Every structure is written in C-alpha cells, then in structure tokens.
Amino acid sequence: MKWTQGLNPEQQKAVLHNEGPLLILAGAGSGKTTVLVARTGRLIDEGLAPANQICVLTFTNKAARELKERVAHKVGDIAKGLWAGTFHSFGLRLLREFHTEAGLPKQFGVIDQSDSTGILRELLKDNRVVGKDKFDLEKILTLVNHQRVHGRQRLEGQDEYHEIAEMLFPKFVRRLELLGVVDFEGLLLKPLQLFKDHPAVLEKVRHRFRYMMVDEFQDTNDLQMRLVELLVKEHRNIAVVGDDDQSIYGWRGAMISNILDFPKHFPPCVVIRLERNYRSAPEIVNLANEVIEKNKKRHGKILRAEGKFSNSQLPELFLIDNEEDESEFVSREIQTFIKDGFAAKDIAVLYRSNSQGGMIESTLRGSHIPYSVSGGTAFFDRREVKDAMAYLRSAVAPNDVVFKRIINTPARGIGDTSLEKLNAYALANKCSFFKACHHWQEAGIQEKAGEALTALLANLQKLPQRLLSGAGTPGERLSLFFREIGYRDYLFLTSSQPLAGEKKWNLVEILGRILSSYSAKAGLEASMLRDFLDAMELRDDVEDDEKKKGVSLMTLHACKGLEFPVVILVGVEEDLLPHRTLGSDVDEERRLFYVGITRAKERLILTRCRTRKRHGQIKPVTMSRFLLELSGQNIKDHRGEFRPVSSEQRENLLSSFLSGLDQKLQGQPKK
C-alpha cells in the first residue's frame, strides 16, 4: 500500500486510523510530519473525505505549506481545498467569512503586539496615569489578555500592574472595537464568542470539517483547546500529534495538561507511540532518555536510535574557567569541526538566555566565522517593514492604528497640534481618525499641513491600482512608490551612516520581492493585496536565505523543530539551566534541556563555567542539577577545556615538534 510503504509498524498504525480520537505521541526525530502527510493523503485518496472537509492546524505557516505541498505531490489536484494553517489564520478565515455576525467591519485590520502596546500607551496617557512611562507595557498587555481569556479576577495583594490592567481591560477591548481591528489574542477569542452567540455558524463550520488534525499539540493553550473541543464535539474525528517531553512554552500560555489529559477528554482514545528516532546518533539518544526520565508527569516513552552513524561519539562536557574562555572555546571547536568536513551551517550554538549570545557573537566575528542569530528582531517586526506594511494596509483597508503610524513618516509637517485637532474632530463627530483627515479644513488644520494630508490620502488612494498594473513587477512598483514619497531619503537621513540606511532600505526591497512572489502565484486580482496583507501579518518564517550559510546562534526556545549535525550547548549551569528567574517550572526547564540535546544529529558538545559575571561581579557557579542527576555513562566529562591526548596523538605531536626543531636547527648558519 503506497501510503504505508517504508513506514515502521507504529507509523503505519497511525496512518491507517480512520474514525474517533487519536493521540500520536511523536518522540523527537520520529517522523511525525511523514505520518501527518501520509494520513491526510490516504483519507483523501481513499475517499473517506474530500480535501475540503479536512482541516490540519499547525503552529507555523511553514509547516502548513510543507504539508499541503507534500500531500498535493502524492495525490495531485484532488488535494486542492485541503485547509492547513495556524490557529490564528484559521480564526482570521472564520472572522473574514462571518464578519457581520462577529460585529466587525468587512475590511477589519489585524494588529500585532507592538500596535497593541501602542494602544495601551495612548490609554495610559488618556487616563493620566502617574508615572506612565515607568510601566512595562508588554507586562500590562499580558495581564489584560489574561483577563480577556479568563474573565476579571480580583486577587488578594494585587500590585499596581494588576490594578492598571484591571482598569485598562474594558477600555482596551472597546478601543479595538472602535478602531475596527483584531489583535492576535482576538483571532482566537472572537471565533469562540462568535460560536457562542451564533450556534448556526458553529453548526455550519462543524459540518464543513469531518476530520481535524492538530500538530504540536503540546503547545496548545486554553483557547486553542476550547476551539478544538467545540469543532469536533459531534464527529470526534480528531487526531493530535505531539510530544509532552517537548512542551517548553508554558510561560506563554501553553498547557501541557492538554496532551497529558487528552485520552481523558476524548475517550475511547487510541494512543500510538512513535519511539524510533531517525535523527540522532545512539549516544545522543541515550543521553536524552536519561535526562527526561527524571520528569514524573509524562506519557511513558523511550526513544530508540534507528539512524545509521559510522563515527558517532559520546556527548562531551567541558569545564571552562569563565565566559570569555567559553566563547574562545566555542570558536576553536567550530573551526575544528569545519576542518573535519562539516559546513558552518551544519553547526548550532544553543543557550538558555539571549544575554549569553553576545560574547560568542563577537568572538565568531573576530575569527571571521560566518554566523546568524535567530530569535532576534523578526523581519515583520522591523520598523521599516512595519512602516511599509502600514502604507499598504492604509491603502487597502485603513484603520487608525496603521494610519497614525505613517501620517508623518516621512516628516510632512503634520505636528502634534494638528494631530490633537484631528483627534478632537473625530471624537466630536463620532468618526474615525482616518475619516477626520478628509475633513482637515473643518478640523481647523493649517493649510500647509492640510495640503500634505491631501497629498498623502491621494497617494494612498492610487497605490492599489498602481501596484496591480504598470511596468515592472509589483515589488518594483512598490519600491518606486517609496522612493517618490521620500521614504528612502528619510531612511538615509535618520541613519547614523550610509551603510545602515542601505540595510534599512534593503528590507523594503525584500518586502517588494515577497509581494512579487506572492502575486505571481495569486494573480493580479483586486483582492490579491488584501490577501497578501492577511498572509504577511500572520507570517512567521520569512528569512534571508543568505543567513542560513553560517553557524546558527539561538536560544533553546528558538531551536525547537530544527536539527543540526553538530550542536554546542553552552552554560549548562545552575541558575542558567534551570534559569534562576525565568525557570520557575523545573520540569519545563528539563524539557528545554532535552529539546536542546535532541537537536544534535552526530556530535553534541556541552559546556559549563567555573565563574560567570553577574551584575558586574564575577561569581562562582556550579553545574546544573540536570548534569548532577546523570549516571555518567552517557557523557564524557573532561573536567577541563581540552580533550585528553591519546598516546598515539602524543607520539605524533612529539614527532612533529622534533622534526620542526631539526629543520630549524639545520637552517641556522654555522658559527
């Protein structure tokens, strides 16, 4: 049978499952994507459900695209209509379709976290909160969103953050409604409210999808679990894939109980364990098993290495004096691995905290070793890209959040006084700020600023048609637009040096290339730009391919889902791993260590230091409790920063030294 060919018995059983709840416990490197693709393809191919009645929810758009492409490659055109995407894109699709029932304008916008914190900043200003500049807006947003999910909860001994969040919560929700926008939390909350208020909509969506699958189920939060339960309540054809041992996002709301208690929530549930690891050498798998078995609340599972490795070795642990020496050690190890035939892109350096990466980065730069840092500012979080996206959104479906971002970027002479008058006009006439700008004369704006507003609004009105037709690609036409309105000049004027300005402008051109690529697939229809904006505002995987050629530097949280022939995991010390302030859940910290270990395919190097600088002072540190728990059989502990030299290596080194000494002596002139 083509769908089970080449699969192991456990994978085959998962692929052949038809009706009812299914939990696939997929250990690290056990081929879960292959199973998801094969099961989806078989359901379509054998006529159990047409593609448009299957929904696969993933955690990245990249994973969804890969799944759709692989299914289509195997079954052809009948795969068209398969819905695969993230929970947030699923929520957006529902709200676009049922926007009237959800109480949203047809062209509602989607805002990200920085826009949400901007709204909170305005609300703090409007409410004249004393010392408003000292508050961490992201922390307030987290507390506001907690109230949105769980309802208003008055807690004993609440601090000022809780009090401010309680005050801002209803105002924040109201402001989103007035602006006609939905934030990321709302993409999950609003569909749940939609289903509650309109049972007919829920029934329609339930009947649309006869089969549901969820990838990375250990990362689901309360809202996502509630959404899944509602959608599958009648047919119960729900298959989830995940690994409780890789649940590392509790700090952002993921609930490991969703996967641990899945069989209780959906009885009778078939549980299939994928325990054959095809990624890592046996020695690495053995260490991973020994680490994770110390966690008590988990589905029992023991990985078995199935891959073929001719030159595998025990993972190595090195003890280094301090973090400066540690970064030099990392540089030397990388150079040695490259001499041994590994490419720079085959190597990853992992650490618990972003602060650990700086010194390693500077040492690699000094050694001329190419590298990239993941988990930094994402492409769509860059100011220049957000500006460009705000122009596009304001041209296609304007809302006040994005329009206020660009109204004076680049500078047009529209100052704070003008903005205050426009705000007052909007409030008095119960209209949007964007609409108020069309009535700038009635708002009392001076003529020079008003003419600049008129020019901006005219440019925005013409932009969609300009991008859809004309010479060159849509991306080239977008770049030309930003040159003409002075945005490129603005980037160079506000940069410390020309090279920095060029890098900023390059981001705008990259966005243009992404637009051209998208339009080549979607066509130059009027709806293309709106679809492009929706897709990009939820996108999570735009990377510069050039960066992938170097060594990868990243946090343990950023490395999940990736694999590398060589992994160097630094700082395996108490108070770093588990982290003293961030690691309140020791079991989750142990899972984080496990995730780092299981990224390695062939070689795994661990480091710990004797001393490390904290708050400007050098202090002694101790090895992580996760190392102390080990028997020692699955790791080679060198107790220093150098490997012991074997007798053969010692003889070769001595021979080489004496030979070089002889040549030097022979070359000296006789006295």
Image (cartoon, grey):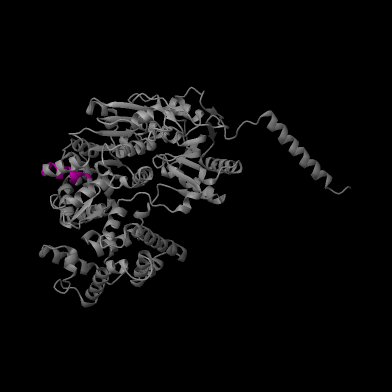
Any magenta on residue 195?
yes
Query: Residue 578 or 223: which is nearer the viewer?
Result: 223
- Image quarter for residue 146? top left
Tell me residue 419's x, y (percent): 21, 66
Q: How many marks?
A: 0
Tell me residue 556's x, y (percent): 41, 39
- Image quarter for residue 417? bottom left
Res. 277 visible in picture: yes
Q: Residue at x 25, y 37 (%)?
A: 211
Q: Is residue 576 left or right of residue 436?
A: right
Any magenta on residue 224?
no
Q: Residue at x 40, y 63 (%)?
A: 509
* Above or below for 5 versus 160: above
Magenta: main secondary structure: helix
The magenta-colored residue range is 188-197
* Above or below for 436 versus 350: below
Query: Residue 101 or 469: which is nearer the viewer?
Result: 469
Quadrant where the image shows the N terminus: top left
Q: Residue at x 35, y 54 (%)?
A: 380
Tell me residue 317's x, y (percent): 52, 32
* Above or below for 566 versus 451: above
Q: Is residue 653 left or right of residue 238?
A: right
* Extreme residue toward the right, this view: 671
Tell me residue 242's x, y (percent): 34, 33
Q: Residue at x 66, y 29 (%)?
A: 646
